[in-house]
Image: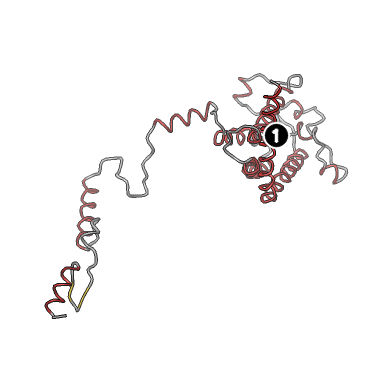
Amino acid sequence: MTLYIAREGSKLWRKVCMETSVELQLLLEKWKLLLAGLIFQYIHGLAARGVHYLHRPGPALQDLGYMVLPELGKERGYISESLFTVIFLSFVLWTFHPFIYHSKRFYTVLLWRRVLAFLVASQVLRIITFYSTQLPGPNYHCREGSELARLPRPESVFEVLLINFPHGVIYGCGDLIFSSHMIFALVFVRTYQKYGSKRYTVNLVVFFVDKKLPEMPDRTGGSPPVLPLSVKDKDSRAKEENHKLLNGNSGETADWRQRPQLNGMHVENGNHVHSEAMLNGT
């Protein structure tokens, strides 16, 4: 048993070392975009902190979700963050599974390169949105009377740049549209849907429907119409076909091939050329 564990441990260590070597080479080539994506995560947090200074508390908007689902409140607020932390850490660990498992469908560096690109694009849209449309936060710490509902004017630039991490990130206000947690969750789920081995419920439904239903016809041309043709459409198609025949543009390209010339005469094949040469005595 000890010998088996030592042998398997040695194989695992060699695999980890080999995978690390490959990933480091990719990291040396692709580090610029990865670094830019990580830096933008700070810029995104800085933008969310900035809009908190502009937040003005007000009455909560009427929303069916707020009416149906019970509010977590201050006592159970940790549930939301705990759930997001589990999703985040699970995805991070999954992206590094090629270092251990034999079955792998991606390189970790290239996968995170794509993930960060999706996150940055979505976060840019989010920043534009919540600075354009500012809504009163419905969370308990964003309501009138809370100390965090209105942030006092910053005393220095460093106070803004430090963004009061992590307290300022967790207890933000004014950045409702749209949720940063949903951006991360949807990007992670979509990435796992494409490169993972299992399917989530919604993606499984889409996968099932795509497999069962026939593909929609292409309307750009070349495919037969779905609906029956009217008399007018049939006449126009008949005229178009006749026009092609008169101009020598029918689909039978083999019957309308260009004929070569020899001494001002058209020839069909090599046998005719040979007979002409015999008649001329050459």
Q: Position of residue 45 (x, y in %)?
A: 74, 40
Q: How is the image coloured?
A: secondary structure
As drawn, is 200 to the left or to the right of 21? left
Which picture quadrant has residue 61?
A: top right
Q: Residues within 10 Å of mark 1 (few under 14, many from 20)?
A: some
Looking at the image, is 190 positioned above or below residue 279? above
Residue appearing at x 37%, y 49% in the figure: 220
Which picture quadrant has residue 54?
A: top right
Q: Position of residue 149 (x, y in %)?
A: 78, 32
Residue appearing at x 74%, y 32% in the figure: 57
Looking at the image, is 232 positioned above or below residue 270? above
Identify which residue, 137 or 255, lies in the foreground.
255
View extreme (front): residue: 3
Q: Which residue is mark 1?
A: 13
Looking at the image, is 72 positioned above or below residue 186? above
View extreme (bottom): residue: 281
Q: Position of residue 185 (x, y in %)?
A: 63, 32
Residue appearing at x 19%, y 78% in the figure: 264
Task: Say which element carries label 1.
Answer: helix
Count the marks: 1
Which picture quadrant has residue 119?
A: top right
View extreme (left): residue: 279
Q: Position of residue 103 (x, y in %)?
A: 57, 33
As drawn, is 148 to the left or to the right of 139? right
Identify which residue, 132 or 108, lies in the foreground.
108
Quadrant of the image for the N terminus?
top right
Quadrant of the image for the C terminus?
bottom left
**Residue kind at label 1, given as amino acid type:** Trp
